[in-house]
Amino acid sequence: MFRKYFINCQEYIENYNIHLINTLFLSFSLVIIALGALMITVESALPTFIRKTFRYGKHKCKDDEHSLANKLEVPKSWFAHFYIFAFGWSICAFYLVLKGMIMHSTAPDLVVIFLDFIGGGKNERKVLIKSNEALIATLLMTLQCIRRFYETNFVQIFSRKNKINLSQYIVGYLHYFGTILALLVNTEGFVKDSTPSTFSFAKITLVQYICLALFHFSWSQQWKTNMIFVNLRKDSKTGKIHSEQHLLPRGGLFEMVSSPHMFFEIQMYVAIMGILPQSLTWKLIVIWVTGNQIVNALLTHKWYKENFKNYPKNRKAIIPFLL
């Protein structure tokens, strides 16, 4: 029964060239841009359900009258779950790319069939990403997933009172599921009748080296930013947790923006886009990530200004000097 259903779906995708990954991130982008703009401009006029869906953590919606939205909330600490998933999923992708390059072999048939299914069909999937680019991009994404896995499971201190909407929890899984697949769907060795090429440092362009430097800077700075959050809730002498309150962060890029961790998140995805210039899917991912981070940063910035009377006036929400 399942096999028949899968074959029917596969034929439908082939006939209409439906790229499921592109559709996913295009949908995410449209929703975050449209509803995000409304949240920023006319939030008070929006239904409580939408407001509670967008707001979480420190800037959660305080209107507790919507019973359905309340029932669809889960602890914010569940963020750690989809980083566990991303940790394993990214390592699998990196292993497949690395193995293909070392062995000069194509991906397993089941992987190719699945990528055909989610990538628009075997007749539409073309090689857009060279093995060199894929290995670098997959390694960077894997490093980010490993670090976030470590942070959320062993370092970050989540307030037990903070909640997120179930939809945000599901979107987290879909984001990493689609993002990792985007590194493979148009890559040499993962497209029918293509073979991985040999890795060479000589193939790395100047632009890609600049993107690697940008990623490294953003990756390390995001770690430092997250540690500032952690240390706000720890006793400097004993290292024990002394508070779950949201305090005013200082130091680093916090002196210029309210959400530097979100700014660095955008930069990392932009850096990978620079390594994968031919990938339309990754461009859609960058639009989605940028929109999502900006909306959340603006809501966070508003919360800071409302809750700290002497909040620094020179701080922007997410982009230094601009926004």
Image (spheres, rainbow, N blue to C red):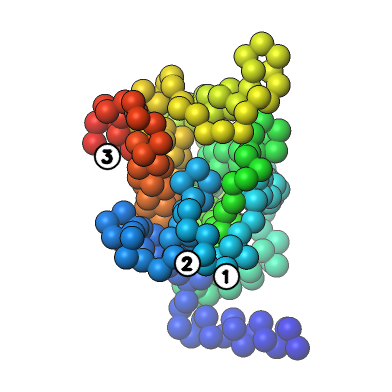
State which mark lies toward you, 3 or 2: 2
In the orientation shown, which residue stands out farthest toward the front?
Answer: 65
Mark 2 vs 1: CB contact within 8 A: yes
Residue at point 56% right, 33% down?
Answer: 245
Give the labeled residue for mark 1: 68
Position in image of residue 95 (x %, y %):
69, 46
In the orientation shown, which residue stands out farthest toward the top?
Answer: 237
Q: How far apart are marks 2 and 1 (CA)?
A: 8 Å
Identify the amino acid type marked 1.
Leu
First of labels 2, 1 by sequence position:
2
In the orientation shown, which residue stands out farthest toward the left?
Answer: 322
- Label 2: state its secondary structure: helix
Residue at point 39% right, 65% down?
Answer: 31
> Label 3: few (<14), some or many (≥20) within 10 Å?
few
> Label 2: few (<14), some or many (≥20) within 10 Å?
some
Picture quarter with the C terminus: top left
Q: In which quarter of the image is residue 282?
A: bottom left
First of labels 3, 2 by sequence position:
2
Q: Which mark is residue 49?
A: 2
Position in image of residue 298 (x %, y %):
35, 45
Identify the amino acid type marked 2.
Phe
Q: In this view, does 94 lie above or below 177?
A: above
Q: Residue 323 carries which label?
A: 3
Position in image of residue 273 (x %, y %):
41, 46
Identify the amino acid type marked 3.
Leu
Which of 281 and 82 lies nearest the eye of the viewer?
82
State which mark lies toward you, 3 or 1: 1
First of labels 3, 1 by sequence position:
1
Mark 3 vs 2: CB contact within 8 A: no
